[in-house]
Image (cartoon, helix red, strand yellow):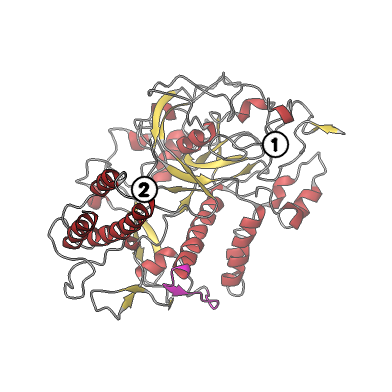
Amino acid sequence: MMRQKIVFFIIKCNNNKDFELKDLYQTLKEMRNKFRFITLLAICSCSILLVSCFKKSSSNKSMATGWNYNNPNNQYIYNFQDFSDQKPGPGLVAIQGGTFTMGATMDNVYYEWDNTPRQVTVSSFYIDETEVRNIDYLEYIYWLQHIYGADMPEMVSSALPDTMVWRNSLAYNEPMVEVYFRHPAYRDYPVVGVSWLKANRYALWRSDRVNEMLLIDAGVIEYDPDQNKDNYFSTDAYLTGIYNAKIAKGVPDYNKGEKYSRNAKMEDGIMLPKYRLPTEAEWEYAALALIGATRDERIVERRTYPWNTDGLRTDEKDHMGDFTANFKRGRGDYQGVAGYNNDGYDFPAPVKSYWPNDFGLYNMAGNVSEWVADVYRPLSYEDFSEQNPFRGNEFTKTVIDSTGKITQVPMTQNEISDRQNFRDSYSVNQGDGDYMSTIQTDWNNKEKEQSHYTSSMYDYGNTTLITDHSRIYKGGSWADGPYYLSPSVRRFLQEDQASSTIGFRCAMNMIKPAFKK
């Protein structure tokens, strides 16, 4: 009987019929009490082979047409590769999405009305376990020096953090100007003095280095130490064929024959999505870490800080009364008294100081504030989207210019004129009350710059400091009082400016979230 059942499953597997794992499980369950342990062990071993056979056969044949994938005889059938689950990129932690109440958890100290609580949903994503460190950013600078240092040194200097942010007209902070970024003692400290624009460029560079290593590890390409400004690996350059890669074994190209190979494609599942800055909603959701705090889909709990109490000291037995974050306790008190410092640091602390929140993320309150992707508007809570809310979309397309360089250009009005889901490639101003949002806008006359419309409406510098280039940063810093430690608090700064109190961490889209209930 056992032999017949095994043969039956092998036949079903080879014929690629409606073989299901639950059928095998039911059979093993029925035989559990009929055979001795050694026999059952043999059956389980056989079942593993059957599962492998099942996966291979089912993924290599089209359920829609019946044609086999990856068959040299079917040259018009695309090369489909197996894919299970996305592996997190280096430094990232998986965050299971869900609904939460976004917005103020305490009264605004300036009586600003820009953060009314509202319920939103955030999709699952990845985010860095810690803030980006000095050593991480130095790696970026050294790469730029290797690629551009000889011919285009301005590419290196333009990426450097602004170390002058440590200076204060009436304070002596010169040691921080000289050593904080480069000295090995500060390698594990958060990088600061990086503008929003520089943080985004770093995230894109990090994406390319991670994907390059993934392709090397997969044996698709070889490492090329001779890369230069005219030929270096970037994800876009590789996918479009501009980068002349040193091919290792490549990816099998069944369209040409079993002995042929090709460049990897995004469809092969080897490369990861791009690193980026998290949205404001993602950052706030990750900081609060309300995982397991609710049951039966009832939103009954709101945290003031990224920990379980409304206080600033831990109630852990072995650390009773210790501070949970790096912040300014009061006027002139940045670290406490000698012999018993309250938080231990008068400037930023190492990125893994204090306790992580329930998602395993460090310093989501205190240490340094962090850039997020969004453009600031005081009435963001009135924005329409309740799912993955974000203001700052600029819809572009990838083109190769006359010099052979890859660039992103806005989608034209003709390309989106028939769309229902968005009406302009530049959505930063969508519904915010400026000229571009009004019914008087002449959509057939687009000669003027978007920034002209915005500045003329907002009168920047006279009536407001808010523009399309005002970016949100979240969380308190080593120089902030307790109020700013709440993840709900939002502030803004121009995207080309930097501060000694602002750092950042990266995020990444999650493909096919696979969290268990």
> Are the residues flagged by discs 2 and 1 in contact, CB closer than 8 Å?
no
> Between residues 235 and 391, which one lies in front from this camera angle?
235
**Three-letter code for the amino acid on which mark 2 is drawn:** Lys
Q: Position of residue 131 (x, y in %)?
A: 60, 46
Splitting the image into 4 quarters, where does residue 84 fall? bottom left
Splitting the image into 4 quarters, where does residue 329 fall? top right
Q: Position of residue 447 (x, y in %)?
A: 33, 50
Pointer 1: what residue?
478
| Total numbered badges shown on the rendered structure | 2
For this view, does 274 lie left or right of residue 191? left
Q: Position of residue 399 (x, y in %)?
A: 34, 63
The answer to whether 58 is drawn above or below residue 261 in the figure is above
- Say which quadrant the C terminus sits in: top left
Q: Residues within 10 Å of mark 2 (few under 14, many from 20)?
A: few
Mark yes or no: residue 468 visible: no
Splitting the image into 4 quarters, where does residue 255 fall? bottom left
Q: Pick out the residue farthest to the left.
A: 65
